[in-house]
Each structure stands twice: as structure tokens, then as C-alpha cells.
Amino acid sequence: MQTRLQSFIEQCLNVGSGFIVSLAFWTWVVVPVWGLPVQMAENLQITAAFTALSVARGYVWRRVFNHLHRGHA
């Protein structure tokens, strides 16, 4: 079973690596397809906001499942 710190670090690495993929997808697919007038600084802000949300979501779900697992041990 993971500690809270290990869960948080895992989520940061997981989502952090996804940040690059998300930023590239947003910049080279979403923006051109929908013709959004977005600057790179705005791209970074939008991607960072979704990344922070993803870290929090992943951490919470990990803690929920660890709690459920402890309840059945």
C-alpha cells in the first residue's frame, strides 16, 4: 500500500508527463481545428489549470481506493 506522499508523487509524475502531451495536442490540434485565437502563454495557463485538476482528481481517487482496500483487509 502506498503512503499519501507516494500517491501524490505518483500522480505528479503521471500527470506531469501528460502535461507535455496535452500541451502539444491543445497547441497543434485543438487550436487550429477550432480556429481559437490563443497565444502560447494562454495555452500554458489552460493546460496548467487542467493539469492541477488532474493531479487532485487522481490523488483523491487513489486515497479513496486505498481507504476501501484497508476496510476489507
Image (cartoon, grey):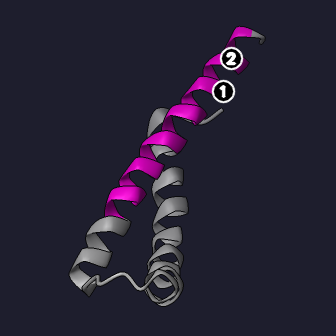
Residue position for label 1: 65
Quarter containing the C terminus: top right
What predominant SS class does the magenta segment belong to?
helix
Return the residue nearer the eye: 52 or 41: 41
Q: Are marks 2 and 1 in contact (CB under 8 Å)?
A: yes
- Point 50% across, 33% down: residue: 60
Q: How many marks overall?
A: 2
Report x, y in % for residue 30.
50, 79
Report x, y in % for residue 8.
46, 45
* Residue type (three-letter) at the residue carrying disc 1: Phe
Report x, y in % for residue 51.
41, 59
Q: CA distance from mark 2 to mark 1?
A: 5 Å
Going by the picture, which residue comes out furthest to the right? 72
In this picture, is 1 found above or below 71?
below
* Residue type (three-letter) at the residue carrying disc 2: Leu
Can residue 39 be found in the magenta stretch? no
Residue position for label 2: 68
Q: Residues within 10 Å of mark 1 (few under 14, many from 20)?
A: few
Report x, y in % for residue 44.
30, 75
Instruction: Please report the bounds of the magenta region as a residue range.
Output: 48-71
Quarter of the view holding residue 58: top right
Return the residue nearer the eye: 37 or 28: 37
In this picture, is 38 found above or below 1?
below
Quarter containing the N terminus: top right
Q: Residues within 10 Å of mark 2 (few under 14, many from 20)?
A: few
